[in-house]
Image (spheres, helix red, strand yellow):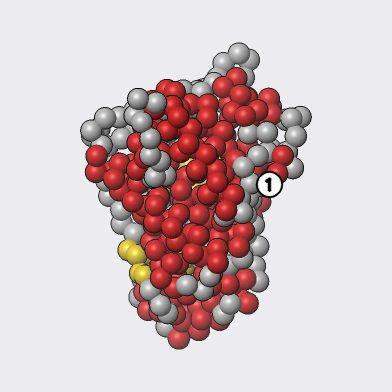
Amino acid sequence: MLNFNYYNKTRIIFGKDTHKEVGKHLKGNVKKVLLHFGGQSIKNNGVYNDVIESLKSNGIEFVELSGVKPNPRLSLVREGIKLCKEENVDFILAVGGGSVIDSSKAIAIGVNYEGDVWDFFEKGIEIKNALPLATILTIPAAGSESSTGTVITNEEKQLKLSCGAELLRPEFSIINPEIYYSLPENQIANGVCDMMSHIMERYFTNTLHTDLTDGLCEATLKTIMKNGLILKKDNKNYNAWAEVAFAGNIAHNGLLGLGREQDWASHKIEHELSAIYDVAHGSGLSVVTIAWMKYVYKTNLSMFVQFAVNVMGVEGSFRDEESIVLEGIDRLKDFFIKMGLPVTLKELGIDDSKLEIMAKKAANFNNGEEIKIGGLKRLGWEDILSIYKLAR
């Protein structure tokens, strides 16, 4: 097990009607709030009215900025930064899923920065200052409600990049499973895959003596899969949503990666799909993950045997480990299909024309130099291209 230093300041407020008390949690701590959200969905399900009423009844002054889209855009982040400066906003309240929260985090780091906020993503500038923020989670998936990171798409450059710091963990996050009843089937499926990928990026490691986090990863994956299938049939099942929402938070708050080298190649490879083709992150991950597994499993066969047996329930002779692994990958693929997720690039409408371009971007290939990605197996652009080809 590797050394680690873990701290998570985010207070999780979980349960029925909790979003209606957001004003009480802000009262006395803020002067003016930016209420940041996507579009009509929070107005259609009543969350918007509940939040506005709670803010007003507690004397919280606020301004609004809507319009966040999946794969949140840099242009709206810049608009939010400008609005916060003009209105002297000192706190951001994100009401939405991962895209809204990531957009809010990017705004938070840009308000007190003299340059362009994109510098943090493209140049890797250290984040030393950020407005505090809180979230009301409307889509459990990304885990951004208590994570350190944010991912933003620069639509002009067709780049999707991340940055992060402890400063970006929200002050508190409200998780009310009742809010998720109106989510359509495709968002449930994409959310399930996103959560699972956050776990698998941490789970597949070469680090030894990680029994505790291995077990936590496995239990969380099985919880998501079991309850994801329940929600596919009954999206108003409170208990199933509670399990999935809690698991989604645990999946990405940093706990499951403690003491172990992590991978994150699949996320980097998928980001190129989202940046160029604007595909839903979860749908891109379901395609990439299966192909990545097929390409790298021989690097650490025993890790994949453990996954196949402990998570996917594969039985068989341990004298034929490869067959166990391949059966585990096939079962994961079947699960994605049952959830209604794509498992090939063709299903996403992606042809071969830009595979090499995406592979080189993923590995930051430039003039013969590249930065290999992944922890379990280091991947150059030619490896990534092979993974894209396996995903066709």
- Left or right of 75? Residue 369 is left
Residue bearing mark 1: 278
Q: Residue at x 62, y 71 (%)?
A: 41
Q: Quadrant of the N terminus?
A: top left
Q: Residue furthest top?
A: 368
- Left or right of 13? Residue 69 is right
Q: Residue at x 54, y 37 (%)?
A: 290
Q: Quadrant of the C terminus?
A: top right
Relative depth, front residue between 199 and 223: 223
Residue 352 figure quarter: top right
Q: Residue at x 38, y 74 (%)?
A: 15
Number of numbered discs present?
1
Q: Amino acid at mark 1?
A: Asp
Q: Residue at x 51, y 81 (%)?
A: 50
Q: Is residue 386 above or below residue 220?
A: above
Q: Is residue 170 above or below residue 177?
A: above
Q: Is residue 11 above or below residue 357?
A: below
Residue 160 rendering spot, x and y as whole percentages: 60, 41
Q: Secondary structure at mark 1?
A: loop
Relative depth, front residue between 274 and 80: 274
Residue 285 rendering spot, x and y as whole percentages: 56, 43
Residue 62 in view, yes or no:
no
Relative depth, front residue between 114 and 90: 90
Residue 229 rendering spot, x and y as whole percentages: 50, 60
Residue 9 figure quarter: bottom left
Relative depth, front residue between 112 and 325: 325
Label 1 neighbourhood size at 10 Å, few (<14), some (14-19), many (20+)? Answer: some
Residue 299 in view, yes or no:
yes
Residue 305 rendering spot, x and y as whole percentages: 38, 33
Residue 250 figure quarter: bottom left
- Left or right of 180? Residue 354 is right
Q: Is residue 325 above or below residue 67?
A: above
